[in-house]
Each structure stands twice: as structure tokens, then as C-alpha cells.
């Protein structure tokens, strides 16, 4: 009798999960209806002081620093990354040794996933009551005044192997896993290089920043953002202004303009450079460096005719790992500006808009 009851309750839970995920409105579906009637639902219309039409400096594309990772002048390379991370919080890298075909394949399988029938995507949606971020979804953090971003997303960890949960990896297209593993294996090399340069820029040993983030347990979390065409792009935002919680974010965009950075009191478009990787300094890097490196404040806008996609990879400390200013950077004249706390506690406060 007990066994039958537990089977029934498990079945009921599964049905409820399916109902719940199918009831959530996905932006991709809203977009197809909105494009028919030329309007968007009110919850996507931002307040006037947030609307791209009124807040973007038009006709100016921000020339964020572009850094050649194959520059033979090692000191110049360290200095360039240090300056960009201190003054901008963002830079682009070229000659990073990830072949363009590997990046193209990553983009292709991600796009194919989002073009699957809705039911297939919902199969890897965030489960009901699930507190993590992994899975297919729409809402990520607490929404202010009920406003929503014009984006659907997929999150899953790709490294280290012990952190991976394949439940949240698409089964379709069939080459999805192999393609993402190939890209990740190459990206780790780029990430280690960047962390080494960032460490040396602060006058530290090459491996000290990485150790301050959890060493070999540093977690790589992939997010795919899917911003469908929007009939009123001047009124909506893809992702609202924010800084990343990660240490650094390594981002692959598609060719549709959308990333904007806040600098000197204004929002500017960031130039698209084919095959470049965009590097964001995140909150944990700002904390480790005791404020020397700046976490970049950025947002994304959407396009009337085209789908924009991006593939940010967030390099995150393990959830139980404590991050705080590196002791060598602290002295009487430079006291700690940030609390030392477990990464999971930092994330909880940030997603729920609580003070740190």
C-alpha cells in the first residue's frame, strides 16, 4: 500500500512539474506573438530612465581595450590587462588560440537547442522549488517592480567534472556535449593565462589569484542567452544593468550588437569584433583585489529584426569557498574594503538584492 502511494505521489509531482514549466511564459514564445501585433506586454516596458532609446549615447561605439594575447612583450601584456581591468572592468582579447571553427560550432549547437520544440527545451527546465540556477529558464533574480528581461537562458556547469550535472545539458543536438567539452578544454587554457596576468598585475605570484578563488576547484558555469527579435527594442532590455558575481566572465557574442557598458555616466555600445572573446571583471575579482580591479556595470539591449545570442562563461569559486581581499594587498593605508564570505552567501544576497 505504502509503495503504491509513493509511486502515485512521485507521478503527481512529475505531472505538476510539467504543468508548472509549461505555464511559465517563455520570451521566445511571447516574441512570436508580439511580432504579429507589433507590441510587447507591459511587464517588458522599462521605466523612461532605463529605456535604451533615451539612455544610450547613439552613434558612439565604445572602444574598450583590445588586447593581443600573443603579444611577445610579456610586461606590456600584463600592464595592458592591469590598466583595462582597473579603468574599464572589461576588455576584448584576440589571438587567444581558440580556433574560430570551435567557437562557430559552440554557437551552432546553442542556436539549434533554442530552435527545438518548446516541450524538448522544457525537459531540462529548472525543477519546481529548485534553488540553483542550472537549467533552461527565463527568470533569474528578483524582479524589481515586476519588470522582466527580454531573454530566455540555459545554465549548466562545464568544469570541473565533479561539478557537472548532465541532467541540465541538452541531449539535442546530439553533438552538443562533445562541442561544449571541446570549447571548455580550450577555454581553460585561456582562463589560466588571464588569471595569471591579473595576478602579476597586482604584484602577486602568477597562481595567487587562482588560489584565492578555489584553485583547481574553480567552477566554470556556462550560460546561453537567447534574445529573440523584439518589436519595440527602444522600450525593452535583454538583461538589466548589473555586475557579474563571478571572478571573471569570458563571453562569446554573436554578430548582433547588444552589449552596453556604463562609463562616465552614460551607456555605450561595445564594438563587436569577430572571433574576439569579451572579458568582464566580476565581483569576486574586485573583492580579491580590494577594489583595484573594477567589476563592470553592463546591460544588454535587443534587436527588432534579429535574434541576439551570447555565451558567457562565469568562473566562480566553489559555493563553500570563502573569498575576501588577498592579505598581501592589505595594510594600514589600504584596509579591507570588502567582507570575506562564502561564495554561496554572496550569491544569495546578490540574487535577493540584500546588502552584502
Image: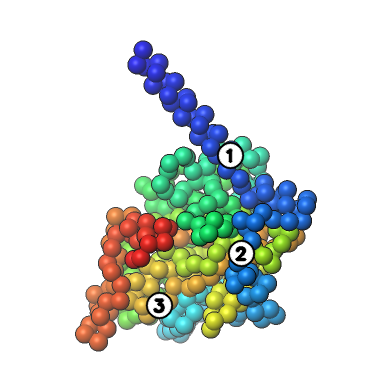
Whether 221 is drawn above or below 2: the answer is below
Q: What element carries label 2?
A: loop
Check if mark 2's residue and mark 1's residue have beta carbons within 8 Å: no
Q: Give the Cα separation between the discs numbered 2 and 3.
A: 30 Å
Percent across and percent down for residue 326 are: 28, 73
Tag 3 residue: 293
Q: Which is in the foreground here, disc 1 or disc 3?
A: 1
Q: How far apart are marks 1 and 3 (CA)?
A: 42 Å
Residue at far left of view: 332
Label 1 sits on residue: 23
Distance in Å between CA atoms under marks 2 and 1: 24 Å
Vertical arrangement, residue 341 with respect to residue 115, above or below: below
| Viewer-proximal residue among 147 and 226 | 147
| Labelled pair 1, 3 in contact (Cβ < 8 Å) | no
Q: How crowded is mark 2: few (under 14 residues within 10 Å), some or many (20 or more)?
A: some
Q: Residue furthest bottom?
A: 333
Q: Mark 2 points at which residue?
A: 46
Q: Is mark 3 on a helix, strand or loop?
A: loop
Amino acid at each position: 500500500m505504502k509503495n503504491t502511494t509513493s509511486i502515485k505521489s512521485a507521478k503527481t509531482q512529475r505531472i505538476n512539474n510539467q504543468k508548472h514549466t509549461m505555464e511559465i511564459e517563455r520570451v521566445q514564445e511571447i516574441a512570436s506573438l508580439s511580432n504579429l501585433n507589433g507590441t510587447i506586454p507591459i511587464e517588458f516596458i522599462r521605466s523612461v530612465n532605463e529605456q535604451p532609446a533615451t539612455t544610450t549615447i547613439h552613434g558612439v561605439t565604445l572602444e574598450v581595450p583590445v588586447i593581443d594575447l600573443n603579444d611577445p612583450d610579456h610586461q606590456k601584456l600584463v600592464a595592458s590587462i592591469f590598466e583595462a581591468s582597473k579603468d574599464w572592468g572589461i576588455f576584448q582579447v584576440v589571438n587567444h588560440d581558440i580556433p574560430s571553427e570551435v567557437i562557430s560550432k559552440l554557437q551552432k549547437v546553442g542556436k539549434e537547442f533554442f530552435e527545438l520544440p518548446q516541450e524538448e527545451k522544457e525537459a531540462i527546465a529548472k525543477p519546481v522549488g529548485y534553488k540553483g540556477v542550472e537549467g533552461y529558464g527565463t527568470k533569474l533574480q528578483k524582479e524589481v517592480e515586476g519588470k522582466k528581461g527580454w531573454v530566455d537562458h540555459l545554465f549548466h556547469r562545464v568544469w570541473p567534472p565533479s561539478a557537472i550535472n548532465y541532467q541540465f545539458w541538452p541531449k539535442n543536438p546530439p553533438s552538443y556535449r562533445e562541442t561544449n567539452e571541446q570549447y571548455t578544454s580550450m577555454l581553460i587554457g585561456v582562463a589560466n593565462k588571464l588569471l595569471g596576468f591579473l595576478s602579476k598585475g597586482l604584484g602577486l605570484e602568477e597562481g595567487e589569484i587562482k588560489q584565492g578563488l578555489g584553485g583547481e576547484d574553480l567552477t566554470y558555469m556556462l550560460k546561453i542567452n537567447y534574445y529573440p527579435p523584439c518589436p519595440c527594442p527602444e522600450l525593452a532590455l535583454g538583461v538589466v544593468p548589473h555586475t557579474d558575481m563571478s571572478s571573471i566572465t569570458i563571453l562569446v557574442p554573436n554578430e548582433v550588437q547588444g552589449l552596453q557598458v556604463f562609463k562616465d555616466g552614460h551607456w555605450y555600445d561595445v564594438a563587436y569584433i569577430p572571433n574576439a572573446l569579451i572579458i568582464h571583471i566580476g565581483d569576486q575579482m574586485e573583492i580579491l583585489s580590494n577594489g583595484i580591479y573594477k567589476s563592470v556595470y553592463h546591460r544588454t539591449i535587443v534587436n527588432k529584426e534579429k535574434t541576439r545570442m551570447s555565451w558567457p562563461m562565469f568562473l566562480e569559486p566553489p559555493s563553500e569557498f570563502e573569498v575576501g581581499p588577498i592579505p598581501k594587498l592589505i595594510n594600514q593605508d589600504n584596509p579591507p574594503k570588502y567582507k570575506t564570505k562564502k561564495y554561496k552567501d554572496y550569491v544569495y544576497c546578490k540574487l535577493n538584492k540584500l546588502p552584502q
